[in-house]
Image (tube, rainbow, N blue to C red):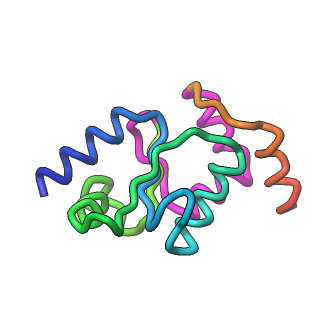
């Protein structure tokens, strides 16, 4: 598991925004991964996607790395943010906007506002 943990740590630290997910940002393979990728894609965040289905060591290792039992998992500037429910709540409450703004992550504020308007 050490190799997986090292690879995860390097990926999380080398990229501003990382989404560990089932599938890819272009083709998610589960509804939860699809929801988080859709939010990030819609608001124009530049992020690295890691398909846990392509590597069993990463799939199990990411759960140990974050001490979080489910996938997807979003990391911003090396910090674990949360999974699907947390990211959804943050998007709807503007907390995700604040997180990105505070960390210098570019995103489309108008698109983020449209998500909230559509779910009001």
* Predominant SS of the magenta segment: helix
Q: Residue at x 13, y 58 (%)?
A: 1
Residue 79: give x, y in percent of width and height: 41, 40
Residue 82 drawn at (x, y percent) = 48, 55
User: Would you say residue 95 sits in the magenta stretch?
Assistant: yes
Q: Residue at x 18, y 44 (%)?
A: 6
What residue occupies the far front of the structure in this picture? 26
Which is nearer the eye, 69 or 20?
20
Residue at point 35% right, 41% down?
Answer: 12
Find residue 87 and report its image quarter.
bottom right
Please tell me which residue is depicted at 40% across the width and 68% down the height of the picture: 70
Q: Is residue 31 left or right of residue 42?
A: left
Region of the chain picked out in magenta, as a range: 77-103
Relative horizontal placement of residue 54, taking residue 20 as reference (left or right): left
Q: Quadrant of the C terminus?
A: bottom right
Residue 59 position within the rendered picture, expressed as x and y whole percent measured from the top left:
30, 65
Q: Quadrant of residue 113?
A: top right
């Amino acid at each position: 598991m050490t190799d997986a943990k090292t690879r995860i740590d390097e990926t999380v630290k080398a990229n501003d925004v990382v989404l560990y997910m089932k599938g890819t940002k272009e083709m998610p393979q589960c509804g939860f991964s699809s929801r988080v990728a859709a939010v990030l894609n819609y608001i124009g965040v530049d992020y690295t996607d890691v398909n846990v289905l392509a590597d069993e060591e990463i799939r199990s290792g990411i759960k140990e790395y974050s001490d979080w039992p489910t996938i997807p998992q979003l990391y911003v500037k090396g910090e674990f943010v949360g999974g699907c429910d947390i990211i959804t709540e943050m998007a709807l409450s503007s907390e995700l906007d604040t997180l990105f703004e505070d960390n210098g992550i570019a995103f489309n504020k108008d698109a983020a506002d449209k998500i909230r308007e559509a779910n009001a």
